[in-house]
């Protein structure tokens, strides 16, 4: 499962009492603003613990700017971390770029609508935000990390067609790996506890190994 999968599972979760959460308990620092803590928790649950632990949105953004600038990006994608210019600073995880100047996010310590506090609202909710509010966009998983649907699109028929030197049996074999789910890259739409999250480079290795064994 991806960090986004864990975030989706927590939609509707609320603090009890103020600023007391399972995220703060996990973090070891409870009772403080927790929008960053929940994002760190979701990444850790997915097996991708962030390299810098903080409860400060600006501190997390500055860490990536100063230490991993290659992971500071411009185009929002699922599983990106976004630092918004909301209040004193607010952090969320990107679910979708809506293509109309807005992004869909899952956020902790916010309100379900525009009527409440946006950066100290007390719950985890799905929100739609203007891209104009984005201060920093971070991609901890890197560009090589892909969801199941992205991998199927990349390694589908169009990808197979590039291998013009392959015999038809090899192309069919590659298609079989994709369709059977042996090659898989996440649980964006299909949540499966036995699913294996794989990087694109790993998937290519599986294909190469299968080709070698078939010879």
Image (tube, helix red, strand yellow):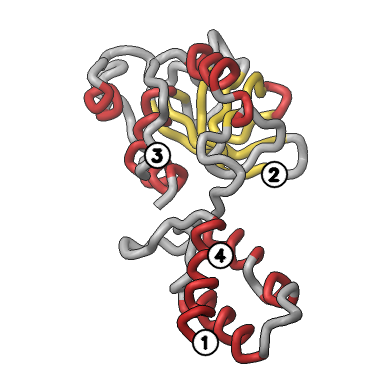
Instruction: Give the mark, 3 or 2, whose residue is nearer the N terminus.
Output: 3
**Where, by quadrant of the figure, is residue 97 drawn?**
top right
User: In this rendering, which labeled residue sits more in front, label 1 or label 3?
Assistant: 1
Q: What residue would you read off at disc 3?
A: 48
Q: Residue at x 67, y 31 (%)?
A: 73
Image spot of residue 131 (x, y percent): 70, 29
Q: Which of marks 1 and 3 is nearer the N terminus?
A: 3
Who's the residue at 33% across and 30% down the image? 14
Report the mark closest to the observer, 2 or 4: 4
Disc 2 target residue? 98
| Pick the front one: 70 or 185 | 70
Mark 2 Cα within 10 Å, few/some/many (few <14, many 20+)?
some
123 over 5 or under it: above or below: above
In the displayed structure, does residue 50 sit left or right of residue 96? left
| Residue located at (68% from left, 83% from top) | 166
Residue pointed to by mark 4:
204
Q: Is mark 3 on a helix, strand or loop?
A: loop
Q: Which tag is nearer the camera, tag 3 or tag 2?
A: 3
Question: Quick one: label 2 or label 1, which is nearer the N terminus?
Answer: 2
Asked if one can make out residue 117 in the rendered structure from this viewpoint, the answer is: no
Mark earlier in primary sequence (1, 4):
4
Q: How far apart are marks 1 and 4 (CA)?
A: 17 Å
Mark 1 crowdedness (10 Å alpha carbons): few <14, some 14-19, many ≥20:
few
User: On the image, numbered disc 1 is attached to which residue?
Assistant: 215
Q: In the image, residue 196 lies at what x, y percent? A: 39, 61
Secondary element under disc 2, as helix, strand or loop, is loop
Is mark 3 in CB contact (under 8 Å) with mark 4?
no
Mark 1 vs 4: CB contact within 8 A: no
Answer yes or no: is residue 110 visible. yes
Label 2 or label 4, whichever comes before in sequence order: 2
């Amino acid at each position: 499962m991806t960090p986004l999968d864990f975030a989706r599972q927590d939609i509707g979760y609320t603090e009890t009492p103020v600023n007391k959460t399972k995220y703060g308990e996990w973090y070891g620092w409870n009772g403080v603003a927790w929008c960053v803590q929940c994002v760190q928790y979701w990444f850790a649950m997915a097996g991708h613990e962030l390299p810098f632990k903080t409860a400060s949105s600006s501190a997390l953004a500055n860490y990536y700017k100063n230490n991993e600038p290659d992971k500071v990006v411009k185009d929002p994608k699922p599983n990106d971390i976004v630092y918004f210019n909301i209040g004193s600073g607010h952090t969320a995880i990107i679910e979708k770029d809506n293509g109309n100047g807005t992004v869909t996010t899952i956020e902790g310590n916010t309100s379900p609508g525009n009527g409440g506090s946006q950066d100290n609202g007390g719950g985890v909710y799905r929100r739609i935000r203007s891209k104009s509010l984005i201060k920093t966009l971070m991609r901890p998983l890197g560009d090589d990390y892909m969801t199941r649907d992205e991998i199927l699109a990349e390694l589908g028929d169009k990808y197979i067609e590039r291998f013009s030197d392959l015999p038809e049996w090899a192309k069919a074999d590659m298609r079989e790996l994709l369709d059977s789910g042996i090659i898989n890259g996440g649980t964006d739409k299909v949540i499966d506890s036995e699913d294996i999250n794989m990087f694109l480079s790993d998937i290519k290795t599986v294909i190469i190994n299968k080709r070698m064994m078939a010879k």
